[in-house]
Amino acid sequence: MELSAVKNTLRIALVGDYNPDVLAHQAIPLAIDDAAAVLEITADYDWLATTELTSPEDLVGYDAIWLVPASPYKNAAGAFIAARYARENSVPFLGTCGGFQHALIEYARNALGWQDAAHAETDTEGRMVIAPLTCSLVEVSDAIELRANTLIARAYGQEEIEEGYHCNYGVSPEFAQALEKGDMRVTGWDAQGEIRAVELVTHPFFVATLFQHERAALAGRPAPLVQALLRAAQKY
């Protein structure tokens, strides 16, 4: 009985600077609680401010890491530590919106050798991995096409979805080309072919989306990727 209880209790690190006014931050606990109820497990979560995350050791013991929206982060280095720790240690990882952007920058720097990888919102020099969107996606919902037989497509159970955004920045054209050469694969696009989701094919569960799928919980709907994250955390 004790072994079963351990397996069915998960610890989730929510990395980001909590703000009760951010809709995504309101939604995340609801999405986790709903997913845990569906899976009949307990999922405990800790909000880890980026200013307090200074070492990979701060993440030891967590069954999954979620790099949450609302950037720029107060300490971008903390966000990069979280993404790298999850990537290099096979810890189940979910990144949304700002989490998506910073996970890609970390991957560019430490996996693809782009040591000057940068974010146009906060950086004035370097190669821009994240650049301004042609059209703002603040409070916009849009259709996304998913690559078949991927973690995200299996989570949703379909290859076309519609989700909401709250962002002004996405993947630069230059970095979109570089992604074709590595293990981070594009798994979701909008109708214009712009990158909206990625996953790391060499990792048990490393998924990042520009859209904020967790906000479905505010409308009482399930968040399939959150359920998938918790399932991966159980295995981890």
Image (tube, rainbow, N blue to C red):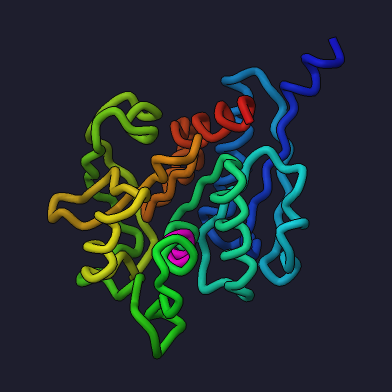
Q: Is residue 160 above or below residue 137?
A: above
Q: Quadrant of residue 75?
A: bottom right
Magenta part, dominant SS:
helix
**In x, y percent, where is residue 235?**
61, 25
Q: Residue at x 67, y 67 (%)?
A: 50
Q: Residue at x 27, y 37 (%)?
A: 161
Q: Residue at x 64, y 67 (%)?
A: 78
The magenta span reads 101-106
Residue 19 in view: no
Residue 141 in view: yes
**In x, y percent, where is residue 203?**
48, 40
Quarter the C terminus occupies: top right
Count of all numbered marks drawn on residues in the image: 0
Q: Is residue 6 above or below residue 82?
A: above
Q: Is residue 1 above or below residue 150?
A: above
Q: Is residue 94 above or below residue 140?
A: above
Residue 102 lies in the magenta stretch:
yes
Q: Nearer the viewer, residue 69 or 129?
A: 129
**In x, y percent, where is residue 60?**
75, 48
Quarter the N terminus occupies: top right
Q: Nearer the viewer, residue 20 or 99?
A: 99
| Residue at the extreme left | 192
Q: Residue at x 39, y 45 (%)?
A: 199
| Residue at the extreme bottom | 124
Q: Nearer the viewer, residue 125 or 154?
A: 125
Q: Quadrant of residue 29?
A: top right
**In x, y percent, where is residue 101?**
42, 63
